[in-house]
Image: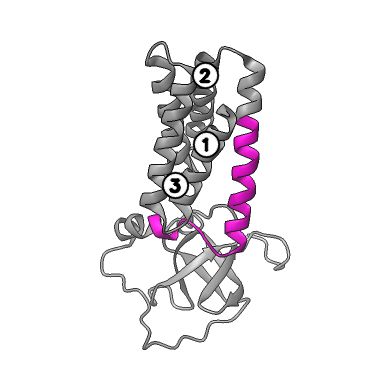
């Protein structure tokens, strides 16, 4: 029962980050984690604080993946909080493994369905864009095609903004085919699916480019 509650909490967190169901999924996550710790029985607030802080660090790592150590520290704190609460290492590993495996499968499925961090990144991108930059509008008809090179104008986490052709040309919404691409990285269009522009960094093998 406890492992199921923990899994539902992680699933809710994934849905809150990747889909438009942010509010509902956040409530489900909060309720699931609350019932989980209540069912196990929390003798003090320290393990709960460790768990929450660790979870926040992991979420932070998702949006700022270049830090690296943040995600590792978050995972350590999260595991420590669970172990302190459960008091059994094997049960902690079992509960967390089940939650991570199922949530990872869901994230992969959502990724294949076209979901990404776009919903949350819209707020981040507004502060990342250079002053005076203009995003492509519907009345523009650029000649974009697979193999066209450009530059990432914001971090791609995996969604973000990029220019193609002219350095100071219009900005386009793009989706990284990789996990993360840093701002300023030379990129190339891998394929275009409807309104989605999938890109990779030019250093990736397969394009015959060596930077």
What is the quadrant of the N terminus in the image? top right
Magenta-drawn stretch, dominant element (helix, strand or loop): helix
User: Of the numbered discs in the image, which one, if any, rests on residue 63?
Assistant: 3
Label 2 belongs to which residue? 80
Residue at 41% across / 21% down in the picture? 48
Q: Position of residue 73 (x, y in %)?
A: 50, 27
Tell me which segment is drawn in magenta.
96-120
**Along the viewing direction, whichever of 11 and 205 lies nearer the viewer:** 11
Residue furthest left as drawn = 132
Residue at 36% across / 88% down in the picture? 139
Q: Where is residue 51 in the image (x, y as percent from the top left)?
A: 45, 25
Residues tagged 2 and 3 counted as in contact (Cβ below 8 A): no
Taking the image as shown, residue 174 lies to the left or right of residue 169, namely right
User: Of the numbered discs in the image, which one, if any, rests on residue 201?
Assistant: none
Distance Cα–Cα, label 2 vs label 1: 19 Å
- Residue 27 position by quadrant: top left
User: Of the numbered discs in the image, which one, if any, rests on residue 68?
Assistant: 1
Distance Cα–Cα, label 1 vs label 3: 11 Å
Nearest to N terminus: mark 2 or mark 1: 1
């Amino acid at each position: 029962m406890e492992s199921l509650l923990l899994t539902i909490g992680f699933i809710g967190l994934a849905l809150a980050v990747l889909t438009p169901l942010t509010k509902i999924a956040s409530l489900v996550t909060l309720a699931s984690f609350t019932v989980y710790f209540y069912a196990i029985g929390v003798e003090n607030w320290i393990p709960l604080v460790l768990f929450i802080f660790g979870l926040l660090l992991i979420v932070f790592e998702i949006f700022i993946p270049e830090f690296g150590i943040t995600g590792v520290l978050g995972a350590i704190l999260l595991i420590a909080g669970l172990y302190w609460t459960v008091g059994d290492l094997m049960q902690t590993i079992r509960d967390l493994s089940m939650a991570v495996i199922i949530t990872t499968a869901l994230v992969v499925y959502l990724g294949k369905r076209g979901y990404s961090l776009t919903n949350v990144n819209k707020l981040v991108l507004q502060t990342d864009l250079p002053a005076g930059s203009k995003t492509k509008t519907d009345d523009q008809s650029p000649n974009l095609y697979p193999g066209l090179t450009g530059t990432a104008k914001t971090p791609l986490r995996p969604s973000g903004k990029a220019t193609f052709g002219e350095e100071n040309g219009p900005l386009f919404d793009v989706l990284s085919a990789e996990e993360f691409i840093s701002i300023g990285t030379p990129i190339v269009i891998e394929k275009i699916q409807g309104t989605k522009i999938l890109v990779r960094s030019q250093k990736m093998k397969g394009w015959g480019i060596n930077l």
